[in-house]
Image (cartoon, coloured by chain):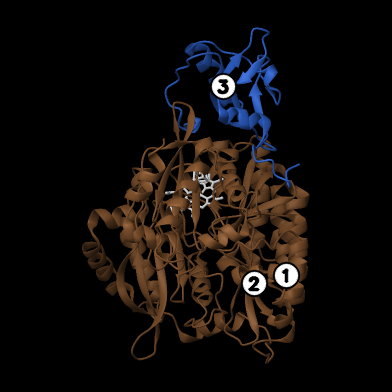
Chain colours: A brown, B blue
Amino acid sequence: MYAYDEIDRTLVNERVSEFRDQVRRRLSGELTEDEFKILRLQNGVYLQLHAYMFRVAIPYGTLATNQLRALAHVARKYDRGYGHFTTRQNIQFNWIKLAELPDALEDLAKVGIHAMQTSGNNMRNVTSDQWAGVAPGEIEDPRIWSELIRQHTTLHPEFSFLPRKFKIAITASDHDRAAIKIHDIGLRLIKNEKGETGFEVLVGGGLGRTPFIAKTIKHFVHGRDILSYIEAILRVYNQYGRRDNIYKARIKILVHELGIEKFSREVEEEWQHIRNSSLQIDDEVIEDIRSRFSYPPYEKLPHMPDELRQAAADPDFEAWRKNSVSPHKNQGYAIVTISLKPIGAPPGDATAEQMDALADLADKYSFGEIRVGHEQNLALPHVAKRHLPALWKALDKLGLATPNVNLITDIIACPGLDYCSLANARSIPIAQELTRRFANHELANLIGRLHINISGCINACGHHHVGHIGILGVEKNGEEVYQITIGGRADENAVLGNLIGPGVKFDEVADVVEDIVEAYLALRERPEELFMDTVKRLGVEPFKERVYATR
Amino acid sequence: MTSPLEQKKIKIAGPSIVTANRTWDGIVVYRTAAKSWSADLSEAAIVRNSDEAKALLAESVADDVGAIGPYIAPVQVGADGKIEPGNLREQIRRTGVTIGQSAQV
Ligand code: HEM
Ligand code: SF4
């Protein structure tokens, strides 16, 4: 867990009273919507189809149980009893009343939660691996650096009025769970030959209308120089970025247009001016942040406790354990992923009751800590293995033990036309139908790891470009039509998927996905060959044939 | 459903209304002939040509304290005068999400 200092607490509280005053002036007509819009966006408040939407940041995906309870309280008191976890370690409430928003913000501020950096053309919530600090083989806890960057960029004038929004993600593991290659800046924590901590820096990733995978701009930037290096990137971006055209304003376009070589030369030159400035980070600053992260008092526990051995006889427990439980860096402990993807339900939603109950379970079994990942699932990061059977039973009662993590029904979907004012087509009902089609656990298991990502418009909030199967909703003559891509991935080997052919209608999407999956099962060389490996080996053609032969 | 937020030129193909979200709570509202807002589509003022549409929109935009983000949306008017939303987006705004979610009240 991370303990905020006095400065942060004061800042958060000041923001609440400031916003309360702004809302008051808006409701009395003193402020027009035009004047108010930028102010509400600075506080995470959007307008959606049915109501205002309120987006709250969960910095680097770490939540304490009192914070999760506060989110449950907001869902219950100010919203309709549920919240929606997004792909950027945020939670959204869909039915908030503007008049009550200052109260909701105030209730959240009491537990150190806020909505800064969740919208607007500024530096957004710096995301990280949801297994940070507990993943085996991790170089060091990447949240220390996320927090450093958060402190440096929150409300920093230079980062508050960028040409466009700006997103950074950090990972410290070989396996990238933070999707750093689809961020404006991706940071991979590494050690150099001397054993010093630093970063491989990637730049210019992003999805949306013009998707790009980030490119490496520098193979090693020393940890003490990371702020000046990021600042150098942002200065070059601020100088050249296209403020005139919203579609060309993201840094990915600039990197593409200048070329990575020229872009990196510009950054290098800028960096030489500022790297030895006050932006250089003292070891004490890092140590201070490090000391604010607390880790549980782990016990020395057996690798294979009796409780686990006994529970292994229950096939339902085993099915869940195989998909939801991952190795922990400390012996005797495990990381448990909580699927927010029950069959037939909207991906990423959690009710207030589930949040409260999960907070209780985290207190009991995970040292009071919960994590939020980019796959719209949650995790309990420090569970003693001997507690796994009891935890599983409790989760199952709450509808939170669907054994489908990383399987075909673990779908990432944006809100789409059911909520979003920018949408062209619905996303959630497509996800729901697909989970019903593949509800059979044996079938899902037979298929193996397969990520489906769905977006309701080209903004790509559901990351469809990097889904193993990606589904993009568009509109054609007033009808919802879906374009389907295959072969994308969002991890350390990130690539964009390829279109398989003409778009298909709402009612046909699930059939098409079934065809693709059947083709894969017939084409794979052995059961261990994953869907994306088969696509890589054979390309789009055989899948295309299968899908369009009868259509 | 191309987002009406990108509405620039005002050109209507059939009977239309102006809709927005009420400022204080965000709920979906429709501009009425009585120059106010109603949550009930049956009370919406119907416009049938671009000039009427422009005028209704201008009047709605001016009432910025009442509702935000007004735009013109198509409707279908039945023989009995019953007004129905003219596209899926407006259908969803009127009747709510289509996802039958348990958490939804
Ligand atoms: C419902 C309200 C939402 C609105 C109005 C909205 C709007 C947008 C827009 C306009 C963009 C494109 C920005 C650009 O390319 O410059 C975007 C990107 C993005 N959104 Fe959303 N979004 C919403 C909800 C969500 C949700 C629920 C998620 C997570 C499930 C999400 C995750 C993302 C991500 C990850 C991107 C970045 C994609 C990229 O790399 O370009 N958004 N959003
Ligand atoms: S992808 Fe489009 S439809 Fe989906 S949430 Fe983002 S902006 Fe809305």
Q: Residues within 10 Å of mark 2 (few under 14, many from 20)?
A: many
Q: Which residue is mark 3?
A: B86
**Subunit of label 1:** A
Estimate the spatial distance between the alpha carbons at disc 1 and disc 3, rounded to whole Å. 48 Å
Instruction: Name the mark nearer the viewer: 3 or 2.
Output: 2
**Subunit of label 3:** B
| Residue A338 seen by the camera | yes
| Residue A500 seen by the camera | no
Q: Secondary structure at mark 3?
A: loop
Instruction: Give the amino acid type for the residue marked by disc 3 in the picture.
Output: Gly
Of residues A45 and B39, the one nearer the viewer is B39
Q: Are marks 2 and 1 in contact (CB under 8 Å)?
A: yes
- The answer to whether marks 1 and 3 sit on the same chain is no
Q: Which residue is mark 2?
A: A321
Estimate the spatial distance between the alpha carbons at disc 3 and disc 2, rounded to whole Å. 49 Å
Q: Are marks 1 and 3 in contact (CB under 8 Å)?
A: no
Dot label at residue A181? none
Instruction: Name the mark nearer the viewer: 1 or 3.
Output: 1
